[in-house]
Image (cartoon, grey):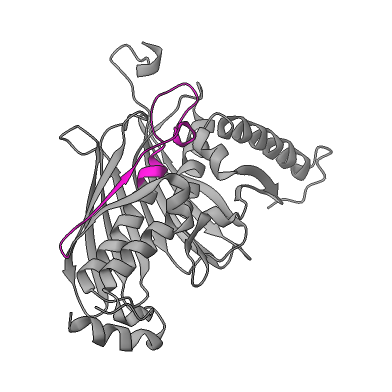
Amino acid sequence: MAGTGNLADHDPVAVARQFGEQVPHSRDLGMQVLAMEADQVRMRLVPGPELRADDAAEELCTSVLYSLVDSACGLAVFAALRELKPIATLDLRMDYLRPAASKRALVAIAHCHHLTDDVAFLRCPVFSEGLDEPVAIGNATFMRATQGKHFETTASRSDAV
Amino acid sequence: MSEAADPMSSSTLDRDVHADTQATWQSLLERIPYARHLGLEVQHSGTRVQVHLPYRDALIGNIMLPAVHGGAIGGLIEITARIAAQSRDARARRPRILDCNVDYLRSARARSTYAAAEIVRQGRRTTLVHVSCWQDRASTPVAHGRVQLLFETVPNGKTREQQ
């Protein structure tokens, strides 16, 4: 694909990935995108001590997992749609299965398991790196194409990829 | 509500109770590294104790709008629920957040966000808290959260941390 600098000429998934890594809150918490494929997005977060739940415990604040899941699910919608129309989180539910150690990196694996014309449904387990059982599971619903009909040319172009 | 001529007016009492709650909440917040990172602070406004999330560029989740990240709003909700539940516990034990469900009602813009908690049920082991978040007016919330928390006990009645 020739790099003319026009957004529509780039792979929308690559653009979304780059975009995802530039989100200020995601950068602030230390998130990185490991993989972005049609069926799943993997994100990693290496926590600093400021992300703990308590001064007296080596445990991550659950809200850090919450932010990671929200970010990974948003990118998974872009990956599944292969288009860059704006989306919005409608709701997100987190189940915290066990405490997450603050000395281990987190890995979230978001999967868009159902799409309708209006809505995307996602599931996203979170793992403490190196452990088999998830520490948390998120379930999210996103609204598609919340605004900005001006993105439509990008969408039709991306269908041809 | 009675307007009876009680020399100790109920509003004075309310103020004392809220000043107390505010101090308790603030001391609980200060022990949470991530709450300090977010810059959360306890305020009280009228009859309500609330948690303030001051705006910073690092909270942005959508550069185009711009809007505060849904995760930052989720964090404000979870931490508000946690300190509301913890402040009600006789031994101020730290509860474990079991689950959290947030409904996003409108986008949170690049300015201050506030949260207030309502304890829906306080059981022997679990506490259910509803949290409302708003920016300009409490009557137009940006998000609603529902958080279930657990006070872990072991057979001898001590918490895990006390063992």
In terms of depth relative to the viewer, which is nearer, B14 or A38? A38
Q: In this picture, is B38 found above or below B56?
A: above
Question: Within the magenta stretch, is there residue A50?
Answer: yes
Q: Residue at x 41, y 45 (%)?
A: A30
Picture quarter with the C terminus of chain A: bottom left
Is B144 left, or right, of A14 in this rendering? right
Q: Residue at x 63, y 42 (%)?
A: B41
| Residue A70 screen position, x and y as percent | 35, 56
Q: What count of labels does the image hold?
A: 0
Residue B159 in view of the camera: no
Magenta segment boundaries in residue numbering: A38-65
In terms of depth relative to the viewer, which is nearer, A126 or B75? A126
Is A39 left, or right, of B160 in this rendering? left
Q: Image quarter for residue B110? A: bottom right
| Residue B117 screen position, x and y as percent | 52, 47
Picture quarter with the N terminus of chain A: bottom left
| Residue A116 screen position, x and y as percent | 20, 76
Q: In this picture, is A106 found above or below A82?
A: above
Q: Image quarter for residue A84? A: bottom left
Is A120 left, or right, of A7 in this rendering? left
In terms of depth relative to the viewer, which is nearer, B116 or B2? B116
| Residue A127 screen position, x and y as percent | 23, 39
Q: Residue at x 52, y 55 (%)?
A: B59
Question: Within the magenta stretch, is there residue A76?
Answer: no
Residue B86 in view of the camera: yes
Is A79 left, or right, of A152 in this rendering? left
